[in-house]
Amino acid sequence: MGRMSRRGFAAAAAVGLSGLVTAGLAVAAEVSGGSGGGGSASSKRRSAAGALRGMWLATVANRDWPSKPGLTAAQQCSELLAQLDVAVERRLNAVIFQVRPTADALWPSPYEPWSQCLTGVQGKAPGWDPLGTAVKEAHARGLELHAWFNPYRIANHADPTKLVASHPARRHPDWVVTYGGKLYYNPGLPAVRAFVQDAMLDAVKKYAVDAVHWDDYFYPYPVAGQDFDDDAAYAAYGGGFPDRAAWRRDNIDKLVRETAARIKEVRPGTKFGISPFGVWRNAATDPLGSDTRAGVQTYDDLHADTRKWVRENWIDYICPQLYWNIGFAAADYAKLVPWWAGVARDSGTQLYVGEALYKAGDPAQPAAWQDAGELSRHLTFAKDYPQVCGHVFFSAREVGADKIGAMARVVADHYQQPAKLPR
């Protein structure tokens, strides 16, 4: 997630807003029965197991926090605590805090520079420790704190000279690929894979984070007319694979598997969760895919085999971004939830649903999103699927502002009582 709005970012930036809408999503029944369960019985089972109620707190481009770069340490801290307080007021129990938005850090890292979103100058210390404070203060409020990292994105521009001179991307220009006007680390290089793991796990070693969280950025979203230039890496490391796409998927699989194993070594009990774009593959592409007509399919376009990670139990939770309304023709929420429930059924991976709170009341969105009750209906629908262990809302700005009262409806209809976290 990185975000000009995480989804606006992922969606608009990568495939174009209309493209994402038609991208629609994926996923029809892996098992045609969708997911099981009758309403009240399944709700009781899930309630007994707990339910995650989360919000994403995005820092890229100062999307949610801090409100602008260059605030004093005291002002930044005050705003951060206010975000945590809003989560408590909305009866949430988890905050997913973006701490490595663009190959940088919101904690004192020996690997990467301080994030520009704090002071306005990449590499400049803000005078306090945002991640350390967030962990301590979230826990004091009864909230889980999930540390959200973006593995490969270096910058939302294409000029390496704008990076601080000590930046690893400047010291290792051979690690960098320019694509779509942005800079990325090359996932095909073993040295990159090792480095990004080390950089992320430094935070896990230092802080009692409840989870490591990744969003939907693996290989970048497709940009029309451009190729991701990894020819040299493919020539060096792609032997034995039937094609480049299979090699790229293996690169991401390795990152997932290795990170999962290392988290368990560094801090046993810390979870590992991933929030991918909501469509694995369309049924027209693969009979195991969903009944959707998505313009983007994670397996094919981002080289992320998200279904495999769940079925192989490589991750502790999956939180697909099901950012479409019930009845949306190209990607119906009411078809995607059963598909993902089928994927998670009988696996060791918990399923949370990513919810598009940011669309509520946006006049550019379909009519369904002008109705304050749309998101509440999502949670009502998902209650029939015991595999759904919670919901996460994008994002903190909207959780607080609640433009048309959609979040208030969710709280009134579903969050009147506190919820234990799923275990």
Image (tube, rainbow, N blue to C red):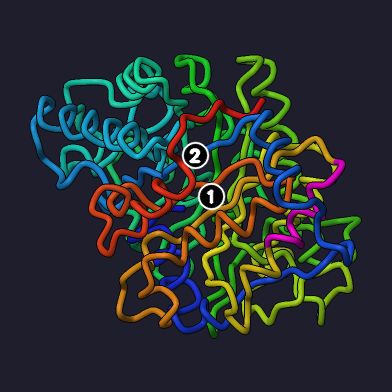
* Viewer-proximal residue among 60 and 255: 60
Tell me residue 62's x, y (percent): 24, 49
For the C terminus, the image quarter is top right
Identity of the residue drawn at 30% across and 54% down: 398
Left/right placement of residue 142 relative to residue 37 reads left
* Secondary element at tag 2: strand
In the picture of the structure, the residue carrying the numbered disc 1 is 215
- The overriding secondary structure of the stretch rendered in magenta is helix
Mark 2: few, some, or many residues within 10 Å (few <14, many ≥20)? many
Alpha carbon of mark 1 to alpha carbon of mark 2: how far? 17 Å
Q: Which of the two discs, 1 and 2, labels the residue nearer the N terminus? A: 2
The circle on residue 53 is 2
Left or right placement of residue 240 versus residue 1 in this view: right
Whether tag 1 and tag 2 are in contact, CB under 8 A, the answer is no
Residue 75 visible, this orientation: yes
Residue 400, image x and y in percent? Answer: 26, 47
